[in-house]
Image (cartoon, rainbow, N blue to C red):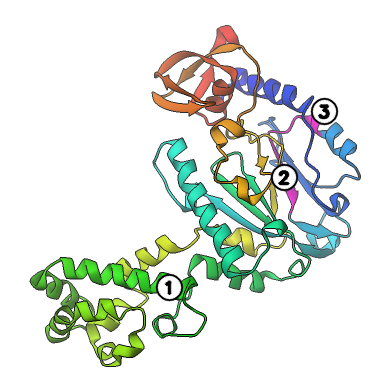
């Protein structure tokens, strides 16, 4: 990013913070804050170990410093401004889930990526409410301003959970450590959740093998470790029966002795593993297990996109939320010249922009986005 581009973005952020209302989380005085500035010459990447006593104090600091990125702690501390983590005295933390495109989808247009991450977020919300019993009222849903969503669960009953307890929860939503024997045996009260998802995945894989035809199906199965042609042929011949009974293989116990079927349900069988993964909620596991995490503050601007980190009014609002409309800041009515590294098509605020490689005249909100993403640079005449 050249100096003219960096100063252009900083000025737009300053104008936004001059009138924007800053976000204040519950228990503000117990939160640690961290900020990344526009000063690329500074040896300190993030200034953290900061605390504020009031909204006014926080707002004043933000207006004066104009941060490029702004974070607060998911944890509650007795002394949040203490210079070391031990000195802060941890007293609990919100439960956080971070759904980011890095863990879900890559190399697709930005709008496609955001739509895919929203689907994963909806999937996770359903798991948390329908299967794990969390109240939607205890959740705060936030568009990260970049490539995904954060779910904050503020429930006093789980505030003091340690990393190991949070690990169990994230393992569940991510489908980690699934026991095929449990998944395939009928249990009262397990008509949904992971048993249903696992059985559906197994049926899909068995149907795929059946659709290969007898010859190729036997060839595929016999290529698996420990599977001979006889057991492969036996499974292919009985595969319709196995598919029909996959909801409860306890009724087809003899088939479970088949080496080919046992190889298919092994944890290292990649085709079934991929199907199971597609039914998991692909949240960033380390974020959930970290009890001292800093996370982006709602109402702040994301320095990698220029979009507003946006808290939704309720979980129910997610389906109709459009980040390319609802998180775009109105930076003004000016147009500026931006030199782009490559051509692209980008929707924003109900319009579709066709941007050519080279110099383009663009409205401020698009110019800020391209410059923050490192796709464009402000050219000298408009710097």
Query: Within 10 angstroms of label 3, few (less than 14), some, or many (20 or more) residues?
Result: few
Write down the residue under mark 2: 71
Q: Which mark is residue 196?
A: 1
**Judging from the image, what secondary structure is the residue with disc 3 in?**
helix
Q: Earlier in the sequence, mark 2 or mark 3?
A: 3
Q: Which sits earlier in the primary sequence, circle 2 or circle 1?
A: 2
Position of residue 347 in the picture relative to residue 97 (left or right): left
Task: Report the quarter where the N terminus lies.
Answer: top right
Vertical comparison of 143 with 5: above or below: below
Camera-nearest residue between 24 and 339: 24
Residue 68 left/right relative to 26: left
Q: Residues in magenta?
A: 62-73
Name the residue carrying label 3: 64
- Residue drawn where x is 23% and y is 79% of the image: 225
Quarter of the picture holding the C terminus: top right
* Up/down of 260 relative to 152, above or below: below
State the image coordinates of residue 66 (x, y, percent, origin top left): 75, 29
Q: Is residue 189 magenta?
A: no
- The x, y position of residue 358, in whole percent, is 42, 16
> Is-magenta flag for residue 67?
yes
With 252 as the anchor, is 167 left or right in this view?
A: right
C-alpha span from label 2 to label 1: 39 Å
Q: Number of marks in the image?
A: 3
Q: Marks 3 and 1, how far apart in space?
A: 54 Å
Where 364 sits versus 178, above or below?
A: above
**Which of 198/135 is in front?**
135
- Mark 1 closeness class: few <14, some 14–19, many ≥20 residues within 10 Å: some
């Amino acid at each position: 990013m050249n100096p003219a581009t960096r100063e252009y973005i900083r000025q737009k952020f300053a104008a936004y913070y001059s009138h924007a209302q800053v976000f204040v989380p519950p228990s503000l005085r117990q939160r640690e804050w961290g900020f990344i500035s526009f000063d690329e010459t500074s040896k300190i990447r993030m200034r953290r170990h900061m605390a504020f006593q009031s909204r006014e104090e926080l707002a004043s600091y933000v207006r004066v410093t104009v941060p490029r990125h702004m974070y607060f702690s998911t944890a509650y501390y007795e002394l949040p401004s203490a210079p070391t983590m031990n000195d802060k005295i941890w007293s609990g933390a919100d439960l956080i889930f971070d759904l980011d495109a890095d863990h879900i989808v890559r190399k697709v247009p930005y709008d496609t990526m955001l739509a895919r991450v929203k689907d994963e977020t909806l999937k996770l919300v359903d798991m948390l409410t329908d299967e794990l019993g969390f109240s939607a009222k205890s959740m705060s849903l936030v568009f990260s301003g970049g490539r995904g969503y954060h779910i904050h669960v503020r429930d006093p009953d789980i505030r003091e959970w340690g990393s190991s307890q949070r690990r169990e929860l994230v393992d569940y939503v991510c489908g980690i450590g699934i026991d095929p024997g449990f998944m395939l045996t009928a249990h009262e009260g397990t008509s949904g959740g992971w048993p249903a998802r696992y059985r559906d995945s197994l049926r899909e894989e068995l149907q795929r093998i059946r659709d290969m035809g007898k010859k190729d199906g036997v060839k595929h199965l016999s290529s698996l470790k420990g599977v001979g042609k006889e057991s492969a042929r036996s499974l292919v011949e009985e595969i319709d029966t196995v598919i029909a009974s996959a909801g409860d293989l306890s009724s087809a116990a003899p088939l479970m002795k088949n080496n080919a079927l046992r190889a298919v349900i092994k944890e290292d069988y990649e085709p079934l593993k991929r199907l199971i993964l597609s039914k998991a909620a692909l949240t960033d596991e380390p974020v959930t297990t970290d009890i001292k995490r800093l996370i982006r503050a709602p109402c702040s601007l994301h320095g990698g996109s220029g979009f507003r980190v946006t808290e939704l009014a309720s979980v129910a609002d997610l389906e109709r939320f459009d980040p390319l409309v609802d998180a775009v800041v109105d930076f003004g009515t000016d147009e500026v010249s931006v030199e782009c590294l490559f051509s692209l098509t980008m929707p924003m605020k109900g319009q579709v922009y066709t941007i050519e490689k080279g110099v383009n005249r663009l409205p401020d909100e698009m110019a800020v986005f391209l410059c923050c993403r490192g796709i464009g640079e402000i050219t000298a005449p408009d710097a």
